[in-house]
């Protein structure tokens, strides 16, 4: 999710300890984890709400394409049949 290296994480931890204090660190960490979890769940719901209708549209488009393909192949076969019988 985030591209933090080891040293960035240590620096971030030191900054948090300085600003928050070691006494409040567990509470802040707990609240931060709750926030991140909530954010993750929200993004999953949004992603699902967007991809689900798109998948339905994709299925409908594929169905239409397949039906059109079958119809064109059938017409092509009929044309081939007529042209081959006309030659004979």
Image (spheres, grey):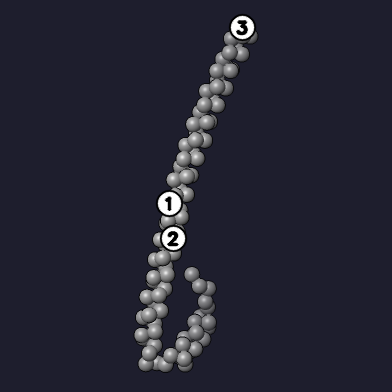
Q: Residue furthest top?
A: 88
The label shown at residue 88 is 3
Residue 82 rendering spot, x and y as whole percentages: 58, 13
- 49 is higher (above) or lower (below) than 36: above
Q: Measure how far apart labels 3 and 2 are at the Cα level.
A: 63 Å
Picture layout, residue 18 above or below residue 8: below
- Say which residue label 1 marks: 52
Q: Label 1, label 2: how many angstroms apart (C-alpha)? A: 10 Å
Image quarter for residue 36?
bottom left
The mark tally for this picture is 3
Q: Are marks 1 and 2 in contact (CB under 8 Å)?
A: no
| Mark sitting on residue 46 | 2
In contact (CB < 8 Å): disc 3 and disc 1 = no
**Callout 1: helix, strand or loop?**
helix
- CA separation in Å, label 3 and label 1: 54 Å
Q: Quadrant of residue 44?
A: bottom left
Look at 49% across and 39% down and name the residue there. 62
Other residues around mark 3 within 10 Å, as few (<14) / some (14–19) / many (≥20): few
Q: Position of residue 70 (x, y in %)?
A: 50, 28
- What residue lies at 36% left-to-right and 85% top-to-bottom? 27
Identify which residue is drawn at 46% across, 87% down. Answer: 16
Q: Position of residue 84 (x, y in %)?
A: 60, 12
């Amino acid at each position: 999710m985030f591209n933090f290296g080891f040293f960035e994480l240590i620096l971030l931890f030191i900054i948090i300890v300085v600003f928050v204090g070691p006494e409040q660190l567990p509470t802040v960490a707990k609240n931060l984890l709750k926030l991140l979890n909530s954010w993750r769940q929200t993004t999953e719901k949004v992603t699902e709400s967007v991809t689900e209708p798109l998948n339905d549209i994709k299925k409908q488009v594929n169905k239409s394409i397949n039906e059109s393909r079958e119809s064109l192949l059938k017409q092509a076969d009929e044309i081939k049949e007529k042209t081959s019988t006309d030659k004979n």
